[in-house]
Image (cartoon, coloured by chain):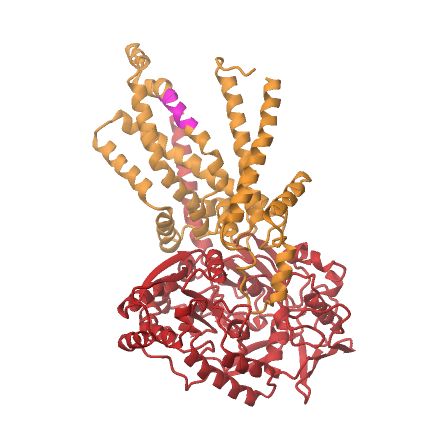
Amino acid sequence: MQRYLVRRALVTIPILFGITVMSYFIMSLTPGDPVQMLINPGMSQADVEIKRRALGLDRPVHVRYAKWLNELVHGNLGYSYSTGAPVTKRVGERVAPTLTLTVTALVLSYMIAIPIGVVVATRRYTWIDYAATFLAFLGISLPTFFLGLAGIYVFALRLRWLPVGGTMTLGGDGGLLDLLLHLILPASVLAVAGAGALTRYVRSSMLEVLGQDFVRTARAKGLAEATVLRRHALRNALIPVVTLAGLQIPALLGGAVITEQIFEWPGMGRLTIEAINQRDYPVLMGITLITALLVTLGNLLADITYSLVDPRIRYE
Amino acid sequence: MKGLRARLTGAIAAVLIVGLLLPAGVWGGPKSEFVAVAGMWSPPNNFNPINTDSSYGFYCVRFMFMGMVEARVENNQMKFFQALASKWEVGADNQTYTFTIHPRAAWHDGKPVTAEDVLFTLMTISDPRTETNRGAQIASIAGLDARGKRAAGAQLGFRILEPKKFEIKTTTPVDPTMFLEMFGANVYILPKHVLGDVPPDQLARHPFFHNPTVGNGPYKFVQYKTDQFVEFLLNENYHLGAPNVRRVFVRIIPPATMLAQIERGDLDVSAGFGIGEVLIEDWDRVKGMAHVRAVSFPAPGYQYMLFNFQRPYLQDKRVRRAFAHAVNRPLMVSQLLKGEGELAEGPIPPANPYFNKRVRPWPFDTARARALLTEAGWDFNRTVILRVPTGNIIRERSADIIRENLIAAGVRVEIQKSDFPTHIAALRSGTYDLGLVGWAGPTDPDVSSQYRTGGQYNFSGHSIALMDQILDEGAKTADPTKRRAVYDRFQEVFADELPMVTLYYANARTAVTKRMVNVLFDASGLFDFQTYRWVAGTQ
């Protein structure tokens, strides 16, 4: 096992290296550059040239990459072109708000999808099933943009129960309750959008399991239907659904661009869009690298967990 | 057991109901007379007074850092007001400018603002190692080259007369209004005692500009919550008087939800022209709100369509005039802007003191356009590429109007849309025929950077000898009356040569709650003029 881990860790290094090379060079091919786009009547031609030099943009791309890599080896992700702040700070300050939003939304969407999925699977082709199917497709097809604005209109503007956006009340001390109240709308919007598809998964997975022999056996034993569903069917039906959650982990950190935008949520999605719009290459490289690292780690973790859960899997 | 469960359920329900009702009272908006909230669309990139690269950054900077004066256009006249300077004198030669810093002007840490700080700021901006975007503002000062940089060994035209009094010499005599706007109102002073030891090439990355605790303005920096808001606290020692409003928040609010924030009363002031406005589709609704003043005013910016002068077929001015006739600009103002805008033929805004009223826009006349094109030998089988940047919805819609109008005049058009950096790259590389861009400049009418041969922002690459000659004359004429005559002439020549077609001057559409008093826009159309005089009533 230990040898396996060491080997996996070693393999990760060339993978990450390859990712940085590819992203850096592809990025350099995008039209437009971060200094050229600065249009300011106060800025003289000399100012433009100084900035270009200071950011190293006067060098060819392979030299820039070598310099960036050298800094990286020394633990420095560089400085944002647009703000001048260290990339680690710019990216780092987004991690907590992003995860707060996306993880809450994920948990919420499972809380919505699992009960509904189970209920409709047991009452297939009844009106409940059709109603749930209708709602699920509504959830899938309504853009989060619309859901978000509709949510703001109803809950923030008409009922005035919730704030329009942000993560804390202006001038307030913040605190958990304050954060929760600001979290409700954006997390619900994301959850509703995600729950639609998930409900369909739970329903079909549940249907499949309900047709299995062991369910018939359980029923034949004379177990109460609730017990059959909860103990025998649901547990097995959830396996593929939980795997799905695992696949969503990198997306969790990527954030939710539109929802963040509408609700003034300081997440990773917004940073990514800002960085692209400003051609802020160091920040983009930072995001790419950290995401790549997390995906690789996530995969490794999943593989190890499999070996712990499933005795048939052994790593040499 | 059953009873306990029921009681527990009851208690949870009660908590939930109270929890839902409680916030209803919490979010009534900022009603306190001590708090005001301004809203802008995007976050500031940093708070560097000489380098923040957007109006968003400068809007925040101006709460904390002042220049010598503040500027505002009143009754078609550029007016200057005390900021750090309590007095300024223009020498008879229009070349010597003496400023006296207010005796009580001080940094937020209590140290006095002195002529040394001003000198330090100028030395920093003119240092060829400093990342800045203020170079063009100081280029007229003696000892600097035309790009605002100091050659090795050059002596800056700056003399400290007293600790709080200094004199600046310009290379040649200049229009005092120009100098006061550029240096006086647009150069914000840095604290020498804080930043004096930082090497110029490392200044742009200095943490101070993310936490500028030592400013000289009416408000002190408290915190910036990334992407959410910037918080300011009053500077009770501000030399022109302590602000009335204790706390100011500048919130970052996406255009789509600004309406909701205004309606709820969560927002007092939309930041202003180009950075925090009411969307055109929300404008009527805002006008109907009882607690809000919907303020629209002529802004110093315009949208235009430029021609690629590398294309031989666009070098004939009859062709360019044909395009001006072909485009239905009145429709853009009446439909796209719902009447909130004006037309003018040229880069000097109608609200600008130098605007030439006698120059009228070429009328919308498809037949005339077609005739001019035929006269110029236009190839009606040619397809021209119209490049449009995404992001400004009204501008994108105007592109569709332009396309239809040009087709009606017999010109085939292909629209190519891209994001802004790509758009600029395309303009710079000349892979287009027509391109849409917006511009907002200072009040001073010197537009050489855009319209002179080889100018920094001369995207179309045009070179018109007569225009160059007039622009050069305007830049070196120091006498305001003579200068006005020069720019009157410039606008006439401009309308004749048409290096670009001015599409429209959109009004700034802003909202200010009625409880706010003394909220005025400055020369650039932003609500950051004399913020220490803001008064917030209760509502």
Q: Which residue is rendered at x = 74% and y = 58% of the image? A: B199
Q: Position of residue A310 (x, y in %)?
A: 48, 16
Q: Residue furthest left?
A: A126
Question: Residue B513: which quarter of the image?
Answer: bottom left
In the picture, measured across the screen, residue A221 lies left or right of residue B134, that is: left
Which chain is displayed in orange in the rendered image? A
The answer to whether residue A135 shows anywhere in this view is yes
Most frequent secondary structure within the magenta stretch:
helix
Q: Which residues are magenta?
A: A234-243
Which chain is displayed in red in the rendered image? B
Q: Which residue is rendered at x = 36% and y = 74% of the image? A: B319
Q: Is residue B317 above or below residue A285?
A: below
Q: Position of residue A253 (x, y in %)?
A: 50, 39
Question: Residue B25: which quarter of the image?
Answer: bottom left
Q: Nearer the viewer, residue A124 or A90?
A: A90
Q: Position of residue B174 (x, y in %)?
A: 63, 83
Q: Nearer the viewer, residue B496 or A103?
A: B496
The answer to whether residue B520 shows anywhere in this view is no
